[in-house]
Amino acid sequence: MKLYDTQSRDLKEIVSTNGILTMYCCGPTVYRDAHVGNLRTFMLADLISRTVALSRVKVRLIQNITDVGHMSEDFAEDDKILSQATIEKVSALEIARKYEEKFHSDLSQLNIGKADAYPWASESIDLMQSMIAELIHKGFAYVGGDKTVYFDARKFDGYGDISGNKLDSLQPGHRYEYHNDGAKKFHADWALWKTAGERSEMIWDSPWGPGFPGWHIECSAMSMDLLEKHVDVHVGGIDLRFPHHENERAQSNAVIGHEAVDVWVHGEHLLFEGKKMSKSSGNVVLVSDIVARGIDPLALRLCFLENRYRSQMDLTWNSINAAHETLKRWRSKMSEWGHSTAITVDPEMESAFKNDLDTPKVILRLREIEKSELTNKRELFMFADQVLALDLDRPIAVRELTEQMQTLIDERAKARSEKRWADSDSLRVQLESLGLHVKDTSDGQIWT
């Protein structure tokens, strides 16, 4: 299998060790619901895992839960979890656990497989402090004038290889921790351990005084510990490429003395109705919003699959609704094609999966198969669904009409035959309020 490696800017074959592929995916900061743009990135790790499994290779996936730490490039910005705790008038820990539970629920509804471990930053403080101490010992970190521990960016050769942002071209304030009080040796150095200052919650004792970890050190500490100092594939959103992944690479490599990650894979941005998804734009969409409209959440997964993971995507309600109708049609077809659980490998789809996750090509292939005269359509769809995870063999739910529904349908049929269009429209509204979708055809009305 080949994936696009952001560092080398080329397709790179992923290689497992002793039949196990190690993977790390940057997880959520649990202070709010994950929107569908976040979930597109988390689905990327799932697609890689499922494709690797086609070759009978096991995956060990770690996904961190950021529940503490300096989670902003700007020191002046408050800790997001503490801020939300103040708004909701509960503890920071309660906020973290509440939104982590919602995160796992969203993953489940999108058929995103579970990671092997979800380490909490708040329970990995010892790991972070140990790594920071080693970075100081090796000359890659120092205690600044404000008692905060900083990574010395100029000590690491190759900074900028992932993002292209080289140290000598970075201007002060360019998307990294910046303040102009002279505490740091160099403006692009970043905090590993932040002194507590006036903060009184979620702080820990350390050799450098009370404080809390920087944002970037947690991923280095947890990935190096849980994956034995080597990551075959590191996954994250394109927005993490700089400074987070650039800094993470520097920290990890500085400690172990060589490249810690083989392949850096990034998912592109998601737009909604032509705009960047944000609170200010009022276009933040959650999985719960999709479910509230009566749409199968896997329709969102299908929308993602119809676009290449490293291409910017513009999601719309129209595309989600269209995907929902496609899922209903395919599941109905699957039922018509029989009930076999057999799987037939399709070389074209298998090649597309392994060629940098070309899922749009797989979807096109399924549409071709659907219209073809092949006799093993169900078996081919079953093969694709090992990776697509759209529950294509889900049985069609058949619900009997209640006596009230049947009466209204009969009355509407009579109203239409008598050309009482206003009555017909009124009865349609009543039926829809009961959960029926009515469609008029040349052969009469049909409902679902």
Image (cartoon, helix red, strand yellow):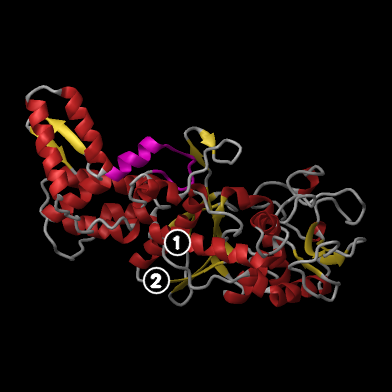
| Residue 231 falls left or right of residue 184 | left
Give 193 or 288, whichever is nearer the viewer.
288
Residue under label 2, please give it: 57
From which residue to which does the magenta span run?
307-325
The structure residue drawn at horizontal position 11% and vertical position 22%, both measured from the top left corner, is 419
Kindly tell me whether residue 331 is visible in this rendering.
yes
Type of amino acid at the residue the image marks with label 1: Ser
The structure residue drawn at horizontal position 16% and vertical position 54%, both measured from the top left corner, is 398
**Residues packed near mark 2 inside 10 Å, few (<14), some (14 to 19) or many (20 plus):** some
Above-or-below relation of 303 to 23: above
Label 1 vs 2, first from the N-terminus: 2
Above-or-below relation of 95 to 160: below
The structure residue drawn at horizontal position 54% and vertical position 40%, both measured from the top left corner, is 277
Residue under label 1, please give it: 105
The structure residue drawn at horizontal position 75% and vertical position 74%, both measured from the top left corner, is 129
Q: How many marks?
A: 2
Q: Dot 2 lies on which element?
A: loop
